[in-house]
Image: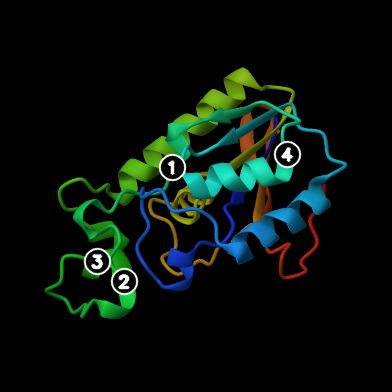
Amino acid sequence: MRLFMIRHGETQWNKWHRMQGQVNIPLNETGEAEAQKLAKILQHKKFDAVYTSPLNRSRETAEIVFGNNVDIILEPLIMEIAFGIYEGYSYNNLDIDESHDLYNYFYDWENYVPLKGGESIQQVMERAKRFFENMLIQHEDETVIAFSHGVLINCAISIIRNLTFPPQRFRINNCSVTVFNNNSGQLILEQEAIDVIGGEVLVL
């Protein structure tokens, strides 16, 4: 199996530095343009299955890339991390010191304890792991694409690297592409967070 994981296009909440989590925010005009550019890059690539997070920003990215040409499968395992009561808050408006509920989310993931309705980093990594396991079983010799989110993809990369926790400041740009490959039943990282919108070259 070869698995392409795509972060969704830009939303207005990305631009405003709001914590989106699992809130259903659509793409903005920039995000739609990013998805259209990605569509041109992938137009000649054949995929055996297309998955997306059910959240609007990922689903809309997938729909722009593929139109009505394929069946798009909604997969809750690859949704973004849930922030609970802090979803919708702007980073710019939070005075985050060591006493703040979100301090460890921004500075120390290993000790981050989510509030009501939120998820820990470990829980997101477990979702990513289950997604990998399902893909290896269902699509052993196929090429698959999945539209997801920054924290989830960061966790997925970290699983392949055998890291206990993802690197906190690793940047995954909107519509960037990460590619995993199946090496005798073991996934390996083939291409990491390729910024195709910024001009980096993706090997198809």
Which residue has dot 1 on it? Answer: 79
Lower position in the chain sequence, tag 1 or tag 2: 1
The quarter of the displayed image where residue 69 is located = top right
Residue displayed at 50% across by 66% down: 170
Residue occupying the point 68% across, 64% down:
195
Front tag of 4 and 3: 4
Q: Of the residues shown, which amino acid type is indicated by label 3?
A: Asn
Rendered image quadrant of residue 34: bottom right
Q: Tell me which residue sits at (20%, 45%) in the image.
A: 117
Mark earlier in primary sequence (4, 1): 4
Comes first in the chain, label 4 or label 3: 4
Which of these two is toward me, 87 or 144?
87
**One can see residue 66 in this view:** yes
Per the model, the C-alpha gap separating discs 1 and 2 is: 20 Å
Mark pair 2, 3: CA separation: 16 Å
- Please, is residue 144 above or below residue 157 in the view? above
- Cα distance in 3D space between marks 2 and 4: 32 Å
Q: Nearer the viewer, mark 1 or mark 2?
A: 2
Q: Is residue 170 above or below residue 61?
A: below
Residue occupied by mark 4: 66
Instruction: Inspect the image, locate mark 2, and give the three-letter code of the amino acid beneath it.
Output: Ser
Query: Left or right: where does residue 58 sit relative to residue 41?
Result: left
CA–CA distance in space, label 4 to label 1? 20 Å
Image mark for residue 104 = 3
Per the model, the C-alpha gap separating discs 3 and 1 is: 21 Å
Classify residue 101 by image quadrant: bottom left
Find numbered disc 4 in the image and state the secondary structure of the residue it sits on: helix
Q: Amino acid at mark 1?
A: Met
Q: Where residue 68 sits in the image (x, y, percent)?
A: 72, 32
Pointer 2: what residue? Answer: 90
**Which sits earlier in the primary sequence, circle 2 or circle 4?**
4
